[in-house]
Image (cartoon, rainbow, N blue to C red):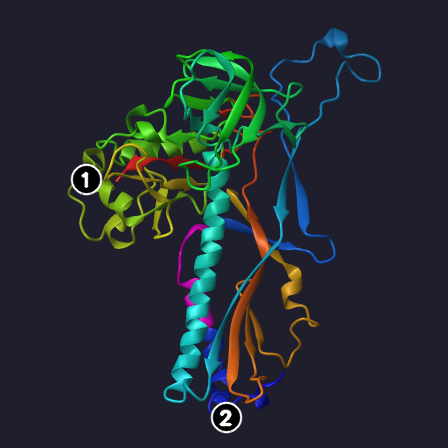
Amino acid sequence: MGISNFPASLQPIIQQGFLEREFEQALRSRLGYRMVADRESFAVGIGETLTKTRAGLKPSVTTPLAAATNTNLDNGLTPQGWGVEQYTVTLNFYAATQDLNMVTSRVGIASQFLQNAATNGEQAARSLDELARNALFAPYFGGNTRVSITLASAAPSIEVDDIRGFTTVYVNGVQTAVSGSYPLMVTVGANTYLLIGVTPDVNNASSAPGGISGTLTFSNDISVSDGTAGNAVRAATASAIVRPQGAATSSALQATNTLTMSALLDAVATLRQNAVPEIDGVYNCYLDPVSARQLFADPDFRQLFQGATSSNAVFRQGMVNDFLGLRFITTTEAYVQSHPTLAGLYIRRPIVCGKGALIEADFAGIGAEDVAPKDALVNIIDGVSMVTREPIDRLQQIIAQSWYWIGGFCAPSDTTTTPNTVPTATNSNFKRAVMIEHIG
């Protein structure tokens, strides 16, 4: 389809690239969660799901080889292997469209044509940013929840607010369902139990963003004191969550638990403990404007920049110096939810990310010649396809302006990074980001 089938008033706009630029500027105007994703191409002809394998490291060798064992063909050495882990990306199709009636929109048709392209670009950008946010946060909520209903008596099962992070364990690098053969160590209240089964609720009642309420079943009875509503339930492989003053759960946050520099430094320290690589020298901190405002009310943060002039980078660009090791990126897409027990208060969730925290897989077939021939008005911009269709209705009045994206996001795990290979490493399955929960 060439531009000759479009009205003469629109052809110069298309030829001069105005339409593509409007879409591109809107698409790239939002600086958010998608920015942290490492982009990969999803090849054609391999199905809808791609499983990738990541190699681990071998333990350090600190014991010298004894001379007495340096014999035979093996020289006294025992072969060592390195661990592997797998992560999976699934392709999905996302699209939206908008019609323009050339007759009823005759007044200002050219500007409306460009405005539609800009609106589509903004919609695509926001949609992909939210997809990236959802994929990034989901595993970092994992393994952290609370008891939702108090036990009447000791029993092997408890109701919890969110079962994410409790359903699987890694066996030889592959996610395997929790069972009696593959249990998961979980701390409920003050004691540790072996989890052997997970059942999601038919009617989801989770208060966590994207959460799934359900029942956890253990190999032994849970005491009533441990199974009391509000008690923390934490898997041994839970992702790190930083809360002011050490609150055990999000529902335990109080009105005074605002964002502090101390919480940010704790998040940075956790990432560095796990040897998570930085992004251009610092870690990215995604937060909403209220969280950013609270920082300037924190005494430690204010003291750090006391006497600083307007030439300081924190005031000019919103970037904090290397002492904090953070780059602040404000976004309106951050998770904000009402406090589950305190009326009028909100829980806000900044997240600090290192390199490799998120993977974006873009389907390579979007721009194939049989899909988008040379004379077609199909433009691939930042992995998103912008499509402009000529009027094909009976009166030849309606132009369709659309966009679509085929791809997926996933947050890879780091189960092979253990104290055997990185002595300061934590036991979390997902190590490349740290979430902070606070009141705001």
Quarter assignment of residue 253: top left
Q: Is residue 312 left or right of residue 425?
A: left
Most extreme residue toward the right, as rendered? Answer: 73
What x and y, as percent, mark residue 125? Answer: 45, 61
- Height in image: 4 above or below 36? below
Q: Indicate the amino acid at tag 2.
A: Ala
Query: What residue is rendered at 68% in x and 68% in y?
Result: 368
- How crowded pointer 1 is (Cα within 10 Å; few <14, some 14-19, many 20+) is rated as few
Report how far apart the C-alphas of labels 2 and 1 lie in the structure. Answer: 58 Å
- Height in image: 117 above or below 296? below
Could you say which is closer to the camera, residue 148 or residue 266? 148
Magenta region: 23-33
- Height in image: 205 above or below 3? above
The main secondary structure of the magenta stretch is: helix
Query: What residue is rendered at 49% in x and 37% in y?
Result: 203
Query: What residue is rendered at 41% in x and 85% in y?
Result: 105
What x and y, as percent, mark residue 18? Answer: 45, 80
Query: What residue is rendered at 39% in x and 34% in y?
Result: 268
Quarter assignment of residue 322: top left
- For mark 2, give the secondary structure: loop
Q: Is residue 384 visible?
A: no
- Height in image: 378 above or below 6? above
Q: Is residue 168 visible?
A: yes
Residue annotated with mark 1: 297
Q: Is residue 310 left or right of residue 228?
A: left
Most extreme residue toward the left, as rendered? Answer: 307
What x and y, as percent, mark residue 358? Answer: 52, 45
Let me know if residue 28 is in the magenta part: yes
Label annotation for residue 8: 2
Figure label count: 2
Looking at the image, is mark 2 or mark 1 earlier in the sequence? 2
- For mark 1, give the secondary structure: loop
